Structures are given as C-alpha cells and as structure tokens.
Amino acid sequence: MPAHTPSSNAPGITPGTTPGIAPGAASDAAPTPRKRQPNGADLVIRLLERQGVDVVAGIPGGANLPLYDALGRADSIRHVLARHEQGAGFMAQGMARVTGRPAVFFATSGPGATNTLTAIADAKLDSVPVVCVTGQVPLGLVGSDAFQEVDIYGMSIPVTKHNFLVRSVDELAEVIPAAFRIAASGRPGPVLVDIPKNVQMAPVDPAVFDNPPQPGQPAAPPAPDPAAISRAAALLNAARRPMLYLGGGVVASGASDMAVQLAERAGLPTVMTLMALGAMPAGHPLSLGMLGMHAARHTNLLLAECDVLLVAGARFDDRAVGKAERFCPQATIVHIDIDESELDKILPVHCGITGDVGLALAELLPLLRHRAETGREAWLTRVEECRRRHPFVMPGADDPRTPYGLIRCAADAVDHDAIVATDVGQHQMRTAQAYPLRGPRRWLTSGGLGTMGFGLPAAIGAALARPEATVLCFTGDGSLQMNIQELATAAEEGVNVKILLADNNALGLVRQQQELFYEGRLVASAYRRKVDFARIAEGFGVPAVDLDASEHPLRDLADALRAPGPCLIRVTVPAEANVYPMVPPGADNLQMIGGEPETDAAMQEDDNDCDAHVDATGGRHAHA
C-alpha cells in the first residue's frame, strides 16, 4: 500500500492557533514542543537495536540520509565510516565471521548500492550472514531513471539468499526481523533490504514504534534422519581406512568441538577445507591440515587411500577435490550438510544426511566404536609413515623476511587467540598451509569468490567485534591496493589490526600459473613501478615498519605486533618464490607439483602405493 503523508493540520488543532493557547490570548512563554513522531528510518534503527546490533559500517548518500539522521539520534549503535561500500561490506563480514551473528552495513542508492555487490556475492559463496540496508530513490521515481537509481533488488537476486524492496513503512516491522532470521537460518547467507527514501521518511504509528516485534531468530534446523545416522555409523564402524573431511559448515554450526571428539573416538585422520581451518587445532595428532590444490603432499596421498569418507559441512569445491571423478575413487562417501541441494551435486554419495552438522555429529558420536575396538592401528601407522616420508616444507621459516618466515614468526609473537585474516593469492595459500590456527572463528579468508581486497576491511570488522584480540592481516601488494583506502578507516577507528605485507611487486599467483602452465609467458602479472607502501600507510595515519631495513627484524616484528592500534609491516619477497605443492587447475589431486624434499624415487614409490587404491578406469565407483 502507498505510504501516507502527514496532514498539514495536526489532529485537534485549529488552523492559525498555537497549541495550548486559547484563540486571541497573548502569551510570553514559548510553546511546549510536541514530541517528534518517529518515521520509517527511526523504526529501522529501533529494530536493529532490538537485534543486538551495536556496530554498523557504511557510507551515507542522498537516498539513505534519513537512516543516518535516525542513526545520529540513537545512542546504542556505533557507526564506522568506510571509505568504499565494498569495504563496508567486508567489515560486516569480518564482524559476522568472528561472532557467528548477522552483521549490518549501509549504502546509498545507485553507485553506493552497486559497490556492495562484490562483498555480498563473497558472503553468499562463503555462507556468511550479513544484512545490507540500501537507500533507494522514492517509490514514485522508481523506473524513471532518476538520479542514482539502479534496480539493486534485481541485480542482487543471484548473489543474495533473499532480498526485499520495501514498498510501505508498514512493512518494515516485518521485513527487518525477517532479514535477520533468513540470514542466520539453515545455511547462512546475505540478505539485502532496499528502502526507498519516502518509506524512510514516512511517519510510523507510535504504538508500533514503542512496541516493536520480537527480534528475528534463526529457525530451528531440521532433525537428522535417524535411519541415515545409523547407516553412517555402520559404514564408519566397518571401515578400515576412514577419514573425516571438515568444511566451513562445521564452523558455522559451532560444531568444531564435536567434530574433534568424533575424530578422537573413532580414530579418524582429519582434513579441512580452506574455510574450515581451525576447526581441529593445528598440531592435533589426527589433523592433516588443508586438502586440495595447495595441500601438503601427504594429505592428498592419504585421501586417495581412504575407504570411507565422512564429509561434514563441505561442498566439494573444485580447489579442494581437484578433478571430481578422480577424488577418493574407492571411498564410500557419507555427506552431512544443512543444504540438501549440496548432496549428490558434485559427487555421488552413499549416505546423505540433511541437517545441522552439530546435531548430526552429536547423534552419530555415541554410535561409533572406540578407536581401540576398530582395528585401525595399521591405518594410523600408515598415516604417520606418509607424513614422515612426505613432510610439508617451509623454507626460511625462522626468518621473518621470507614468505613463510613472516607467517611463522608473526604466529610465534602473538597469542593463540589472535584472529587471522588474509587477502587472496600466494600469501593466502602460505598462511593456510603454515599458520597454526588453534580454534574456530579465528580465520577469515575469501574462499569461494576469492576476492582480492577482502583482507584489510574484513580484519577491521573482526577488530571492531573483538577489540580485545590482535588481528593479523596477511596480504600481498596486489590485494592491498584493491581496498587500500580502508587504511584511513583503520587509523580513524584505532583498530588493533596488524597488516603483514609480502610485497613482490607482482600478481604472484597469476605469475605462477603463467610460469607453470603458459610456457612462462608473463603477461600483465608484474607491476612496472614499485609502490612505497610504508609512506602511503603513514600518510593515512598508520605507522609502518619495513623489515627490509631492519637490523633486528625479529625484535622489530614483535614490537610492532605488541604495540596498540593499526600498523603495516612490510617485507620484500621475490616474485619467483612460488607456493608449493600445487595441483594444476582441473587436474587430479595426485598430480602435485613441487613441495617434495625427498628423492624422485621415494616419491614415485609412494605414489605407486596410492595408485593401487585408485579405480583402474580412473573414475569413481557409483554408489547405490
């Protein structure tokens, strides 16, 4: 229904008179001001407060100024002025990723709204609950090509879990709680709420404003099928070489501890996707780290040998499984996921379980035989032997002026509760390989979309949500330049973000693929001019440390990490320093390049051992 406009005459007041004064009477006293009637923007802020939102990142513009006016009148929500709407979206992601709760960001119409789309798409692919509230031109101008008008509702449909175009102020009390409920229910994801300016300015019934609806809460997840749980337990109990494969859904459901308990009870060697790192602590005897394109060699080799694979909250991303038909070719697959559409989407599964990962693992746990009863000691011995013969290699790990050393030395200088964010590229893969993450929700990276420019604003968001924590942001020069303007936001807010820059003056992972797979033809992957990042950071008000010029790099690194507030720490790395191992895009995960300290003969012998477990046709067994 169309929003109504206030009458020029207030109810019960005669035109031309002053409230509270009889006609014709004189008064020396100022009239008593009427209580201001709330409008749609006030109601939005009130509903956000009800949801427990205490920080919002964003940028104001003409179409969302009523929201900002209302925000200014509120005293419980802190606003963080981003320098780009994409940065605001990634700040919201950082908050949501470390807390597990939906976070909010604002943008105006037109270019402000379109600037949010990359951050929204990134949240969709990584299942992050964020709510984007955009201003829109007044409803009467929608479709007229008005100034800064775009159909952000239509544009955002493919990259949101749900979206709303609010057509009446009466809809707000329902839409805002629904946005939070949808964002957090089932498989989390982004929701966009587009609010025309006239809806923001329309008066709200004071009774609605004073008695707002209950906050939107996640819907209860579906209960796992008991019969499917029993089938999964029977398969795992009969397995001789089982493995556990954890995805980001384990972190999203808060099921990390349950997953570790299950692995320990049944003796399951465990791999994690990029999104699940930290779900099992680094250094745990059963942890094999990340699988896939840049996994340790022993991780991919052992996956090829498993006979039952329990997959929890993962979607078989191509960077994780490589050539799908060659992934774990002899394994019976048990797949648990909250999103039923993921079952049988990439790989056929023998036993599919739809439901919350935490609930499913909790029901599965008591049905599994204890490790001592399974007769799997030969398998666990094989795992340790493969680790020994194919260790992960980190050259220069003790020197902070090397690619791996910057990561390892930074990790040694901070506590276990530090939060780690990355951008996208070689530094991201090295951090995934080498940083000893010891718990969930301490790892922020762009997994599905692979967005350069994610790291710095996401780290700022994490620091806003967890101000007591040190936040490390590992980045490269290519990625940092994508959202370098947010250095100003970091300085302005004084966030405890340490930016660790591996500067190779190149697009490193692009260069690496050109070197390996395009006969060394390096096209548009190197910068012709070097950037002085230390001076740029200082210009934004962020202190900088250049380890290249340091006489005591370990000490200077530790001092910079201990100091309060933001800091940029830079080190030069060679453009030729590739990240290994690497599986060529589209190849079998056993076709790893590099990262092997042992002789070719030893490597071939072990690879042959693995090949014995691969179906002779090179494909997967179809499961019933």
Image: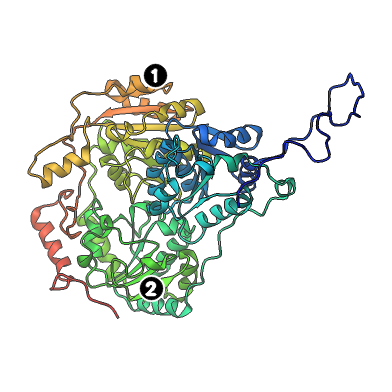
Please, what is the three-letter code of the amino acid marked with disc 1? Answer: Gly
Q: Is residue 449 left or right of residue 111?
A: left
The local secondary structure at tag 2 comes to: strand
Is residue 46 or residue 244 the one in the foreground? Answer: 46
Describe the colour scheme in one phrase.
rainbow
Residue 140, position as x, y percentages in the image: 53, 43
Is residue 380 or residue 221 the one in the foreground? Answer: 221
Q: Residues within 10 Å of mark 2 (few under 14, many from 20)?
A: many
Residue 237, position as x, y percentages in the image: 37, 77
Residue 619 occupies quadrant: bottom left
The residue that appears at 54% across and 38% down in the rendered structure is 56
Query: Separation of disc 2 and disc 1 at Cα?
Result: 55 Å
Residue 309, position as x, y percentages in the image: 32, 69
Whether residues under marks 2 and 1 lie with C-beta atoms below 8 angstroms apart, the answer is no
Looking at the picture, does residue 332 appear above or below residue 357?
Answer: below
Image quadrant occupied by the C terminus? bottom left
* Sequence-first tag of 2 and 1: 2
The local secondary structure at tag 1 comes to: helix
Q: Is residue 317 left or right of residue 597?
A: right
Please, what is the three-letter code of the amino acid marked with disc 2? Answer: Gly
Q: Which mark is residue 578?
A: none
The residue that appears at 50% across and 67% down in the rendered structure is 359
Residue named by callout 1: 539
Looking at the picture, does residue 495 appear above or below residue 392?
Answer: above
Is residue 97 or residue 10 the one in the foreground? Answer: 10
Q: Residues within 10 Å of mark 1 (few under 14, many from 20)?
A: few
Residue 322 occupies quadrant: bottom left
Residue named by callout 2: 352
Residue 257, position as x, y percentages in the image: 47, 59
